[in-house]
Image: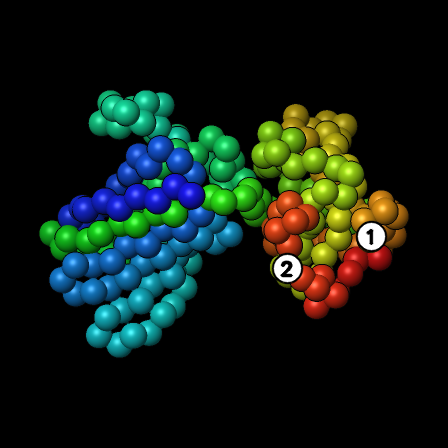
């Protein structure tokens, strides 16, 4: 697993780090005050968890956080073109961006950055294919094929909003779309198509390889 640490001084302004890999988790720790900021690949972009040293309170900051980026030349980050990425574009990411309002990015306050690389692909996606979708999930901003997702029930989709799961039966590019953004789903590992999966707009889902899913899956509700 990739892992790196960096020393930096907060600026109170937007900053970036070239890591050389896509991070699964990032943590900033202030070396004087001891404040801490954290982010995971399943956390929405520009969000982050903040822990204040003086109170120990840990809260979600939904306005300032972290986001994936791509450096055109990670060996020369100062002269690179930096492109902001969606979480699902993990396969392009080689760095992290830090918003100006992140707690540990305080002007003139030193901090240590730690970043852990991915051990398996995790794709966070948000349904935008309409309400009451019973046979498929769709996020038109994500190309699941490029993200490495395949059909044949080898991947699991977990609907975090509804606390249920299904198997990925196939990856499709719907008519009028430019990306392979639709996942038809199955209720079992044999590929029985769902008829009541009930995806609604804004449902947050995570797609992971089947072998990395929690066991037993019966702890979640099965889509049918």
Near mark 2 (Cα within 10 A), the count class, few <14, some 14-19 or many ≥20, is: few
Q: CA distance from mark 2 to mark 1?
A: 15 Å
What residue do we see at 68% from left, 48% from top?
210
Query: Quick one: label 2 or label 1, which is nearer the N terminus?
Result: 1
Q: Is residue 63 visible?
A: no
Near mark 1 (Cα within 10 A), the count class, few <14, some 14-19 or many ≥20, is: some
Mark 1, residue position = 188
From the image, which quarter does the N terminus lie in?
top left
Q: Which mark is residue 221?
A: none
- In the shown orientation, is residue 49 left or right of residue 178? left
Q: Where residue 48 sits: x, y (%)?
A: 39, 57
What residue do we see at 36% from left, 23% from top?
72
The furthest residue to the bottom? 55
Identify which residue, 15 or 75, lies in the foreground: 75
| Dot 2: element | loop
Q: Where residue 111 sits: x, y (%)?
A: 19, 53
Q: Where residue 176 sits: x, y (%)?
A: 72, 27
Is residue 46 placed above or below 170 in the rendered structure? below
Q: Where residue 138 sits: x, y (%)?
A: 69, 42
Is residue 197 placed above or below 60 in the rendered structure? above
What residue do we see at 74% from left, 32% from top?
172
Mark 2, residue position = 214
From the image, which quarter does the C terminus lie in?
bottom right
Q: Are marks 2 and 1 in contact (CB under 8 Å)?
A: no
């Amino acid at each position: 697993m990739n892992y790196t640490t960096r020393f930096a001084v907060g600026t109170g302004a937007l900053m970036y780090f070239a890591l050389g890999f896509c991070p699964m988790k990032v943590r900033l720790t202030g070396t004087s005050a001891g404040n801490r900021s954290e982010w995971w690949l399943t956390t929405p972009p520009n969000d982050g968890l903040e822990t204040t040293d003086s109170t120990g309170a840990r809260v979600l900051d939904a306005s300032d956080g972290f986001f994936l980026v791509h450096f055109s030349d990670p060996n020369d980050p100062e002269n690179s073109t930096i492109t902001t990425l969606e979480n699902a574009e993990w396969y392009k990411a080689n760095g992290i961006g830090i918003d100006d309002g992140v707690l540990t990015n305080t002007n003139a306050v030193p901090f240590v950055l730690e970043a852990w690389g991915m051990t398996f692909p995790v794709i966070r996606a948000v349904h935008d294919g309409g309400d009451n979708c019973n046979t498929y999930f769709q996020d038109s901003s994500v190309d699941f094929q490029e993200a490495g997702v395949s059909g044949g029930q080898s991947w699991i989709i977990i609907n975090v909003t509804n606390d249920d799961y299904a198997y990925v039966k196939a990856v499709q590019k719907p008519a009028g779309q430019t990306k392979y953004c639709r996942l038809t789903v199955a209720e079992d590992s044999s590929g029985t198509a769902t008829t009541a999966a009930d995806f609604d707009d804004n449902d947050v889902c995570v797609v992971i390889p089947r072998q990395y899913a929690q066991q037993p899956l019966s702890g979640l509700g099965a889509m049918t």
